[in-house]
């Protein structure tokens, strides 16, 4: 749930900033991709709540963290190398670090679910 809330906060603010600054549709493409990943995550959560952590739901829950990490690695490097003010870079690197940390926690938690399922099946 933390990754879901955090992702909605971060990318919701990105959309608001892009619209407020009239950055055009191109600035919204990545936010749209992250919105689809977030919706996929929500579907995985709902399926997990209804039927337990089956393989299908677990795979859906992996989409958001699997996209979050590379997106923030690329964005972080791009922001740091684009000549922005130090404060801007620091804020975005903190956003990246939190997003990546939450993604790793979800990934590890789901890995634990998968290991438990394999132990039960054996």
Image (cartoon, rainbow, N blue to C red):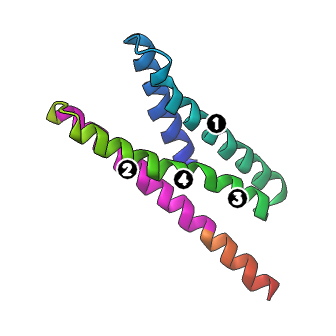
**SS for dot 2:** helix
**SS for dot 3:** helix
Residue assigned mark 2: 73
**Which part of the image, by quadrant, shows the C terminus?**
bottom right
Question: Of marks 3 and 2, which one's residue comes earlier in the chain?
Answer: 3
Check the image and report above or below for 15 versus 10: above
**Percent position of residue 63, x then y:** 62, 51
- Residue 59, which numbered label? 3
Residue assigned mark 4: 65
The answer to whether mark 1 and mark 2 are in CB contact below 8 A is no
**SS for dot 4:** helix
The alpha-carbon separation of the residues under discs 3 and 4 comes to 11 Å
Q: Is residue 115 magenta?
A: no
Q: Nearer the viewer, mark 4 or mark 2?
A: 2
Check the image and report above or below for 69 versus 83: below
Is residue 90 visible in the rendered image? The answer is: no
Magenta residues, start to end: 87-110
**Percent position of residue 29, x then y:** 52, 28
Residue assigned mark 1: 36
Question: Of marks 3 and 4, which one's residue comes earlier in the chain?
Answer: 3
**SS for dot 1:** helix
**Percent position of residue 83, x then y:** 17, 33
Along the line of sight, the residue nearer the viewer: 87 or 53: 87
The alpha-carbon separation of the residues under discs 3 and 1 comes to 15 Å
């Amino acid at each position: 749930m933390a990754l879901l809330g955090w992702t909605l906060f971060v990318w919701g603010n990105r959309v608001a900033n892009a619209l407020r600054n009239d950055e055009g549709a191109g600035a919204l493409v990545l936010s749209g991709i992250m919105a689809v990943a977030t919706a996929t995550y929500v579907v995985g959560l709902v399926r997990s709540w209804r039927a337990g952590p089956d393989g299908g739901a677990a795979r859906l829950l992996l989409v958001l963290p699997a996209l979050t990490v590379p997106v923030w690695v690329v964005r972080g490097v791009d922001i740091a190398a684009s000549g922005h003010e130090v404060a801007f870079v620091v804020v975005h690197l903190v956003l990246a670090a939190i997003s990546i940390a939450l993604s790793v926690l979800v990934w590890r938690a789901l890995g634990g679910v998968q290991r438990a399922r394999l132990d039960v099946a054996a």
